[in-house]
Amino acid sequence: MQVGAASDCSAYFFLAEWRSEMKLKEKRELLFRILFGQSFHPEQDFDAEALEVFNRNEKPISEEDQEIVRKELAEIERLLPEMDERINRRVERWNTATMAKVELAILRLTVYELFYKKEAPVNVVAKDAVRLAADYGQDAAYRFVNGAVSRLIEELPKATGEKDE
């Protein structure tokens, strides 16, 4: 299944109530930027200074939203070996040790959102992954991410009543 194709897979996922001031798309971009930045300094905690720097240089976020982001970053950090293993199984000719940092950060966030967080429909997560790759990656990054996300989506359980294609 290609990203952007109509899919009933999204019916499997629920939309969690988002009670904070930060929109889901803003949170996704913030998480991506922190994951990307952390890839240059793997010895640092995921949230050690990132939120402070973000608050100084970007639109400040509330304490409540910072706490939400910190919890998700801690969960991503805990799940990182498992998420990287999943990425390595599904991405052809590349692995997490050799792929570009932008694409790696996007795929890690996408795996987290698809398989663990399940906060947004599959098609929304997939389209945002491709959008992030187009916005932040090199010229062909969006195509790479699109293909990788499509292969990752194949691992998702199908929604009840969904027919095989």
Image: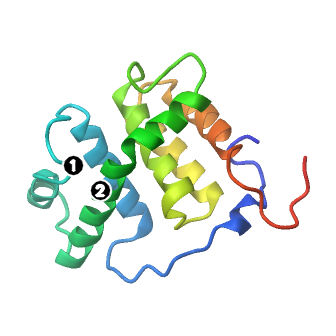
Query: Which residue bears the numbered disc 1?
Result: 46
- Of the image marks 2 and 1, the number of the one nearer the N terminus: 1
Query: Which residue bears the numbered disc 2?
Result: 73
Disc 2: CA contacts within 10 A as few (<14), some (14-19) or many (>=20): some
Q: Quadrant of residue 120?
A: bottom right
Residue drawn at 71 percent across, 43 percent down: 154
Q: Position of residue 35 (x, y in %)?
A: 30, 44
Disc 1: CA contacts within 10 A as few (<14), some (14-19) or many (>=20): many
Note whether 42 is above or below 56 in the view shown.
Answer: above
**What amino acid is at disc 2?**
Leu
Q: Are marks 2 and 1 in contact (CB under 8 Å)?
A: yes
Q: Quadrant of residue 103?
A: top left
Alpha carbon separation for disc pair 2 and 1: 6 Å
Instruction: Specify the quadrant that holds the N terminus.
Output: top right
Q: Is residue 11 left or right of residue 109?
A: right
Which element type, helix, strand or loop, lies under badge 1? loop
Residue drawn at 69 percent across, 63 percent down: 10
Label of residue 134 in the image: none
**What amino acid is at disc 1?**
Phe
Q: Position of residue 91 (x, y in %)?
A: 58, 27
Residue drawn at 16 percent across, 55 percent down: 54
Q: Is residue 130 left or right of residue 4?
A: left
Q: Position of residue 133 (x, y in %)?
A: 46, 37
